Image (tube, rainbow, N blue to C red):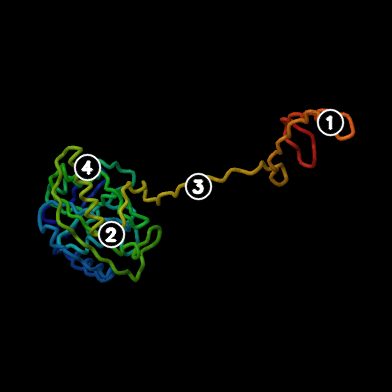
């Protein structure tokens, strides 16, 4: 198998193994056209991706099919991180490493993945990353996490923003990929220079990247981070209305107690002696009424 020209084949960092075929390899010449047909792929402004040299391609993320679409869209070989379990999928799974997927075992520390990607960038590879850190379940573009800015600052690699649309319909979250494929389009934006390696520069870089991804995708903006694990944000729990009474055991809710009127001051009844003061109502028992009229506990 022909290897990518710049990176060293078989680069490994602990659990991460990276092998990707070259642009002219048989694997890419067979798989790439098949994927383009299956995805009905349309690519806009691919020339923003430099043909050589280390570059980060920072993409929106809604589906496992995003990486396949990006691998098929670009003429130069690309690397991207992917859950090792994806390689066990029928038909598509075994082909993913041949399109540049870097299989990562779930539970591997982020530092391992970042170290592997940094090594690839320094050797001149193109690397796909997902700044949101997780697939978007609601279609919005979430605030980028700090990993992309740190990686760009550490290597000096430019960052090309990319918006992928249509992949969720091809491979929905929690479902198998659809055999009939779909219609996917990818739009690349102008490269963003790497930031200086200080917190302020990295934050400003992340804001510029977020703006670019929102503009390219045409999707709604989310200024918060994507939920960990890709779970949809939980709606706020409405406050229940105050209870109108306390439910009696085995019965319907009791009515609120009626306030006791103040005792009469002994106003004389017509034609008779003054009435006696009203007997004060005794305080309620602290016990709770038992069902069927039992006494207090």
> Between marks 4 and 1, how big is the CA–CA gap?
84 Å
> Between marks 1 and 3, how big is the CA–CA gap?
55 Å
Secondary structure under the numbered disc 3 in the rendered image: loop
> Between marks 1 and 2, how big is the CA–CA gap?
91 Å
Callout 1–callout 2 Cβ contact below 8 Å: no
> Between marks 3 and 4, how big is the CA–CA gap?
35 Å
Secondary structure under the numbered disc 4 in the rendered image: helix
At 25% from the left edge and 62% from the top edge, which residue is drawn?
Answer: 69
Q: Which of 296 and 79 is in front in this view?
A: 296
Would you name the residue on which mark 4 appears? 203
Callout 4–callout 2 Cβ contact below 8 Å: no
Q: Nearer the viewer, residue 112 or 198?
A: 198
Callout 1–callout 3 Cβ contact below 8 Å: no
Q: Which quarter of the image is occupied by the N terminus? A: bottom left
Dot 1 or dot 2, earlier in sequence: 2
Callout 4–callout 1 Cβ contact below 8 Å: no
Dot 1 or dot 3, earlier in sequence: 3
Secondary structure under the numbered disc 2 in the rendered image: helix
Q: Residue 268 carries which label?
A: 1
At 70% from the left edge and 38% from the top edge, which residue is drawn?
Answer: 257
Would you name the residue on which mark 2 appears? 66
Secondary structure under the numbered disc 1 in the rendered image: loop
Q: Is residue 231 left or right of residue 128?
A: right
The image position of residue 267, as x and y in percent, is 81, 30
Q: Is residue 179 left or right of residue 23?
A: right
> Between marks 4 and 2, how big is the CA–CA gap?
26 Å
At 29% from the left edge and 50% from the top edge, which residue is drawn?
Answer: 132
The image position of residue 117, as x and y in percent, is 20, 47
Depth check, mark 4 against mark 2: the one in front is 4
Q: Is residue 278 left or right of residue 199?
A: right
Would you name the residue on which mark 3 appears? 238
Dot 3 or dot 2, earlier in sequence: 2
């Amino acid at each position: 198998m022909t290897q990518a020209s710049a990176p060293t084949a078989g680069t490994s960092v602990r659990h991460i193994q990276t092998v990707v075929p070259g642009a002219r390899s048989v694997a890419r010449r067979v798989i790439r056209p098949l994927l383009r047909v299956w995805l009905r792929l349309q690519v806009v402004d691919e020339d923003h991706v430099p043909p050589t040299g280390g570059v980060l391609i920072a993409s929106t993320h809604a589906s496992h099919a995003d990486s396949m679409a990006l691998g098929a869209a670009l003429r130069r070989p690309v690397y991207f991180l992917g859950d090792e379990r994806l390689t066990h999928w029928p038909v598509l799974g075994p082909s993913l490493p041949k399109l540049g997927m870097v299989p990562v075992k779930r539970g591997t520390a982020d530092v391992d993945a970042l170290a592997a990607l940094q090594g690839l960038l320094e050797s001149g590879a193109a690397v796909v990353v997902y700044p949101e850190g997780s697939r978007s379940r609601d279609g919005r573009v979430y605030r980028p996490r700090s990993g992309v800015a740190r990686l760009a600052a550490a290597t000096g690699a430019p960052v090309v923003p990319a918006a992928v649309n249509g992949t969720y319909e091809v491979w929905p979250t929690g479902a198998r990929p659809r055999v009939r494929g779909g219609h996917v389009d990818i739009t690349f934006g102008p490269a963003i220079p790497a930031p200086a390696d200080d917190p302020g520069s990295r934050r400003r870089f992340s804001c510029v990247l977020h703006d670019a991804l929102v503009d390219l995708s045409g999707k709604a903006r989310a200024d918060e981070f994507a939920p960990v694990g890709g779970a949809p944000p939980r709606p706020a729990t409405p406050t229940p209305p105050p209870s109108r009474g306390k439910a009696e055991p085995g019965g319907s809710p009791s009515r609120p107690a009626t306030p006791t009127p103040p005792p009469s001051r002994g106003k004389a009844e017509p034609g008779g002696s003054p009435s006696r003061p009203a007997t004060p109502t005794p305080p309620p028992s602290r016990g709770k009424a038992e069902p069927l009229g039992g006494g207090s506990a």
